[in-house]
Structures are given as structure tokens and as C-alpha cells.
Image (spheres, helix red, strand yellow):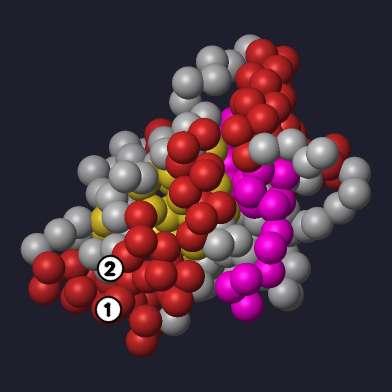
Amino acid sequence: MNPTIEQQYVALKERMERAALRAGRGVDDVHIIAVTKYVSVQTANEAIEAGVTHIGENRLEGLLEKKAAIGNRVTWHFIGSLQSRKVKEVIGNIGVLHSLDRLSLAKEVQKRLVEQDGTLDCFVQVNVSGEASKNGLAPDEVDSFIMALAEYDRIRVIGLMTMAPYTEHAEETRLHFKALKQLQQRIADKEYVHAPCTELSMGMSNDFEVAVEEGATYIRIGTILVGNEQVSE
């Protein structure tokens, strides 16, 4: 008999807590984002009933469908690459954007936030591994990019996000997470008003424990929490 989402959520939290303990961290500052890209509204609701308070989507269609059904009972995160032409529909439906990686996108986000008289918490996406298949800024581009974002007063840079290379051996991701933590701390030490940069969005089903050990404050979990029903593709 397959475990329920509630059982998987409990098991996930236990693993997360052990990872935090190994790093000498408290677990209260680590938030689980249930990534629901491949599952139904019903499954997303089951995750919420189990205790999930953050939902992540990386497709506009999936976000709008689930937001319409679920509403504002959770914090909504957009974690995928965002095309400028889709910003208008995303802004107002999310609490956090994880993929800010270019000034043209920041300009469009700012424009829509002004129209709605809103602000938005954002992560700057960093391609720490340098993989051509991944979006994000190179690490040496981050400082100048964040300085340039001071012009966009509706955007608040709360932290940095990365995706480590997929590997069967999670330990191999450690150097990437460690590098992002060092970069995040360097930005935070500058004490920018528009970019407190205190958060780290990193770690997924296969490597979240290493990410937590290296300082993750948001982990993005799909497969081992809600499964993979392939309904949204």
C-alpha cells in the first residue's frame, strides 16, 4: 500500500529536521514548497490538508488552474522560467517569484506591480553550475544585477535561487549549494534596502538534505511529497 501524502510529509519533515540538526541549524527557518506541476488540484489539496503552506508552480496554466480552485490558503510561488509576455497574468497571483534573472523581466514585473499598486518578493536565479541547459545569472554577474535592481522599487530581492545538476549522489551537489550560500551572504552583508537577500531557495527531492545542511531556507519538493501524476503536461 502506497503511503499517503500526509505520511510522506511527516517523513520529509523528519529528514529535513535531521539535516538541520547535523548543520547545527534550527529547522523553523526552512520552508517546504510543494511543487505541484505534475499533479492534480485534488493532490495539491491533500498536501495542504497534510500541513503544506507553500505551493510552487512553474507553468502559468498550472498556477492559474490551482489558484482558482484553492485560493489564498497558501503562499504561491512561481519557480519556473518566466517569459515577459506572461508576467501580466502571473503578477497578482503569486507571493514569491524564484526566477528573476534579467533586467527586461524586472522591468516588466515592475510595470505590472505599479499597475496593481503592489510589491513582490523575488529570488534572483543563479546558474552556479554553469550548465548551458539551466537559466540564471553567472555568479560574477549577480552583484551588478542586484545593484541595478535598486531602480525597481516594487521588487524586493529576498534571496538567491539555484538548481544543482541532477545526480544520483547528492553529496556531489554540496559545492554548488555552498557557493550559493557564500554569494548570498556577501550580498546580505551589503545591507541593500531593496535586497536584504537573507533567503536561499535550493534543494529538491534528490538533494534537499545537502541543501539544508548548506543553508537552504526554502526547499522545492515534488516527487517524494506529492508524486508525479503527469496531469499537467
Vertical arrangement, residue 168 with respect to residue 152, above or below: above
Q: Nearer the viewer, residue 10 or 211?
A: 10
Where, quadrant-wise, is the N terminus in this rendering?
A: top right
User: Residue 136 appears in which quarter of the rendering?
Assistant: bottom right
Q: Quadrant of residue 37?
A: bottom right
Identify the secondary structure beneath mark 2. loop
Residue beneath the point at 70% across and 59% down: 228
In the displayed structure image, the side of residue 25 where residue 124 appears, left or right: left
Residue 123: in magenta span: no
Does 70 sit above or below residue 174? below
Q: Residue 202: percent from the left, percent from the top?
A: 61, 45
**Which residue in the protein does label 1 denote?**
88
| Labels 1 and 2 touching (C-beta < 8 A) | yes
Residue at 36% over, 47% down:
75
* Residue 218 falls within the magenta-colored stretch: yes
Question: Can see residue 184?
Answer: no
Neighbourhood count class around disc 1 (C-alpha, 10 Å): few under 14, some 14–19, many 20 upward: some
Q: Is residue 3 visible?
A: yes
Residue type highlighted by circle 2:
Ile
The amino acid on which the numbered mark 1 sits, given as a three-letter code, is Lys
Say above or below: 208 vs 100: above
Q: Residue at x 20, y 74 (%)?
A: 112
In the image, residue 121 lies at what x, y percent? 31, 51
State left or right for residue 93 relative to residue 41. Answer: left
Please, which residue is most extreme toward the right here?
168
- Total labels: the figure holds 2
Marker disc for residue 91: 2
Residue 66 in percent (x, y) is at 41, 63
